[in-house]
Amino acid sequence: MSKVAFISGASRGIGRATAIAFAKAGYRVAITARELDSEVAQQSTQGSLKQTAQMMEQLGCEVIALKMDLLDFNSVASALKQVFEHFGKIDVVVNNAIYQGAGLNASLLDVTQQTLEKVARGYIGAPVQIAQAVLPSMLAQQSGCIINITSGAGEKDPPIPASKGGWGYAYGAGKAAVSRLSGIICREHGHQGIRAFTVNPGVVNTETLRATIGDQGIKGLQQAVAEPDEIGNVLLWIADNSAADELQYSTISAQKLARELNLPK
């Protein structure tokens, strides 16, 4: 029986590309997002989980699309319950969804306790909740892979203040927490067949990025900008290849790895 992947934040961008990559590889896939339909998505970053599911079904993939809000414990629990009821197991998790709020990149003196509480739930509580839900069955079968998506904000200090376009404390702290989760899983369960990775996609040409800075802004970055498909192929390679195991306990640069492996873009 084919493996099952659970991929969050799959209505567009990296999440959609990853879901399609796993579908092409023969996985059965559960995909999630805060909303199922594009009508309720922000117009500037319009995406639809149902559209993603339809694209995967056209590839012959068995897929279920589920509404899941990282900030809602019961919503996360319900989505995971439905996946186990439908597929019976989860072999691979890609924690791609993130909490996106207006105060994430506020300056230190302006960041609110409300924002920090949401960061704690979205970047710490939800990923841990997902790990705690999938690990027992992974341990029972002595195999499983959890991939956590981070960013440079979780690895280093901002180059400029938040007021001038750098990232704020809330976002940086949230991503730093995500970056630490994989190593903890490896230390505690690596000897039991569990693999866990932290992946930094770098700058990716997504709907969200284009809506934020525009096509000219992307050109103005003057650095490598990957397409979502490239990142999706990297994540699939990590999930499927034991050669990736030596990359545990460190943050993987997805774009660098894609170049080294000459993966399709």
Image: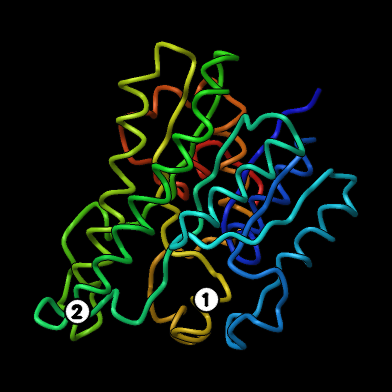
Q: Which residue is mark 2?
A: 162
- Mark 2 residue element: helix
Q: Quadrant of the N terminus?
A: top right
> How far apart are the two marked residues, 2 and 1, measured between alpha carbons?
19 Å
Question: Which residue corresponds to mark 1?
Answer: 208
Q: Position of residue 30 (x, y in %)?
A: 70, 47
Circles 2, 1 touching at the beta carbon (< 8 Å): no
Seen as rendered, the residue at the extreme front is 74
The residue lying at 58 percent from left, 76 percent from top is: 207
> Residue at the spot x=71%, y=84% of the render?
39
Q: Residue furthest left?
A: 109
Q: Residue at x 64, y 50 (%)?
A: 18
Q: Position of residue 180 (x, y in %)?
A: 28, 40
* Residue 121 against residue 128 in the figure, above or below: below
Q: Is residue 235 above or below residue 243?
A: below
Above or below: residue 151 compared with residue 253? below
Residue 237, x across and y down, in percent: 59, 34
Residue 44, quarter of the rendered image: bottom right
Considering depth in this image, is 225 or 20 the residue closer to the camera? 20
> Tag 1, which secondary structure?
helix
Q: Earlier in the sequence, mark 2 or mark 1?
A: 2
At label 2, which amino acid type do we have?
Ala
For label 1, the crowd category at 10 Å Cα-Cα, with few meaning under 14, some 14 to 19 and many 20 or more, is: some
> Vertically, is 51 above or below 160?
above
Give the mark count.
2
Return the residue nearer the eye: 43 or 35: 35
